[in-house]
Image: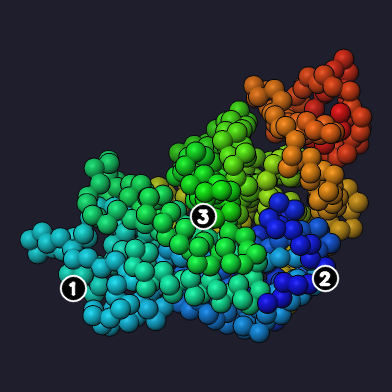
Amino acid sequence: MTHNIESMDNVGRFWNESVGYIIYPETFKDGNGDGVGDLLGIISELDYLRDLGVNLLWICPIFSSPMDDNGYDVSDYMTINPMYGTNEDFKKLLDEAHKRGIRIIIDFVLNHTSDEHPWFKKALEDPNSEERSYYFFRKGRREGDKILPPNNWKGFFSTSVWKQIGDSDDFYFHIFSEKMPDVDWSNPKLRQRYFDTARHYLELGVDGFRLDAVAHLAKDTSFENSSLPCDENGLCYDTDRFSNRPELFDYLHEFKREVFSKYPCFTIGEVGGGISAEKSLLFSDRETGCIDEVFNFDTAWCNGAYGSIDKKDDEIKTDVLGLKRSLKHWYDTCHARADMPLYWCNHDHPRVLSQYGSTQYRAESAKALFTTLLFMYGTPFIYQGDEIGMSNVNYTRPEDFFRDVGNKNEVASLRARGYNDEQITHYLNRVSRVNARTPMQWTRGHEAGFTEGENKTNKINDNYLEGVNVLDEMNNPWSILNFYQYAIWKRRSPEINNLIQNSRFQFLDMNHPDVVAYMHEGSENLVVIASFRPYQTYFSFYWAVRDVLLHNYADVILQDHVFTLRPFECFLLKV
Ligand code: NOJ
């Protein structure tokens, strides 16, 4: 265990004192010159992360994997993926991070394994094995000469949830890619396997887990056909059949009882878009829940980009009212009973700067978005590269997105529906998760400073040559990066953190269609005002400004209690 490190604060619910940072290891930093990010690369940038001010890392999966879904298809939970390094490198990463006061939570994939995991291989080889009972195998439906899948459900990656085994009658169940068979959490032996794995990593010194796809651990095992409308292939996207079902809370309570409660660890589950704020408390209620926080996606698509292939660019506009309603609803419903994360995007979403900000106002909008997020109630998470204003790609063909199996399947399905490659590429440049998975841009030099070798991951975004890189940002006193650093320093000060955790919070002028503004009322009053528009707007303000703590323009225009807000202008004020 490496927990007793002098430089680490020793608070119980340490995530309430934390600013998190999400690392996508494949494209963060290459430490050995083979063209792919790795653990040595992360270690080499720990000083950068400490200086930025973050003290909690969520690292996307780093375990052995054939990389069908970039590591979310784990073939061995006990071994670091050789492309990322060794188990020794991982221990070194934990030690070096802890020395700098940075905690690490790892991405723990519980819903499925890779089809190359020894459990699954054994399950295929020997139908009488214990491992066979770890997965869902069912017989197909015979129709004449044909064998159809056991039911008509569609998974998250645009295919049937069933994969036929050779030409036999047997199928196995997978809600993501066909190389990711779902495991059966109703099986106590399977659960013990995962509990043992979690114990192993907690003993090693990890500070917790981001629990991948945790909402899906229980399924409707009647596997009856869905009666929802079907797509052109007769498949129904009926995610309730495998999301947030009651049994999963029993599994997680057992996990908490047997493992999580015995360690000073942080557990944050990905529950996606299918859960209400009310129901999320079943996961994260401080008294009665089973994990500490949940990530939902409700604030991720408030510009209508999701599924927007038929929309023109000017139809994609941030729905500021909808965004505020969603933030307010989650806050009102949860904050008294649960801790909550704050984040704009992760490795599964396009870049927030392209979604809600503007590349035309890169610095202004990056700062406004960050200020809005950082000072709300919750544990903020920054996604790698947002701190230098990274934005969506401008790829030229669908194949450029094929390192994402979800996109690859989606392209096939869109082509089958008659869309041409130009339309598909335009759409993926807007929504693909590859947008967030391009190499981190460190310098203007060779491969943007990501690797000394030849980049073997997604194509680098060319804008590193226009100053969107860490080095240029460091050298510019007014940069996004320097703003982030200063803002995080403010956010982590005990005075401001206490105010945020313990004051009365309210949104100001909920009906303003262009501005997000809120206030913490406590021993001091803290106000955030941020325009979400690339044009001038106005905001009425009735308090006396005592101090401007953060601002992204050189001067303030406040007359007769009205702020004139320039594009994406934002403030953090004491009033
Ligand atoms: C959620 C992860 O964030 C995503 O990247 C992955 O494809 C699915 N879960 C499947 O593990």
Mark 2 = which residue?
A: 6
**Mark with earlier residue (2, 3):** 2
**Residue displayed at 81% across by 58% down:** 52
Disc assigned to residue 84 = none
**Residue displayed at 59% across by 42% down:** 337
Report how far apart the C-alphas of labels 2 and 3 lie in the structure.
Answer: 30 Å
Which quarter of the image is occupied by the C terminus?
Answer: top right
Mark 3 = which residue?
A: 290
Q: Mark 1 against mark 2, which lies toward the viewer?
A: 2
View extreme (top): residue: 560
**Residue displayed at 34% across by 63% down:** 186
Q: Mark 1 against mark 3, which lies toward the viewer?
A: 3
Vertical side of 32 occupied by 257: above or below:
above
Amino acid type for the residue under numbered disc 2? Glu
Total tally of numbered discs in the picture: 3
**Mark with earlier residue (1, 3):** 1
Q: Secondary structure at mark 1?
A: loop
Residue 49 falls left or right of residue 426 = right
Vertical side of 275 occupied by 472: above or below:
below
Q: Secondary structure at mark 3?
A: loop
Amino acid type for the residue under numbered disc 3? Cys
- In terms of depth relative to the viewer, which is nearer, 44 or 54? 54
Q: Are marks 2 and 3 in contact (CB under 8 Å)?
A: no
Q: Secondary structure at mark 2?
A: loop
> Mark 1 CB in 8 Å range of ligand 1?
no
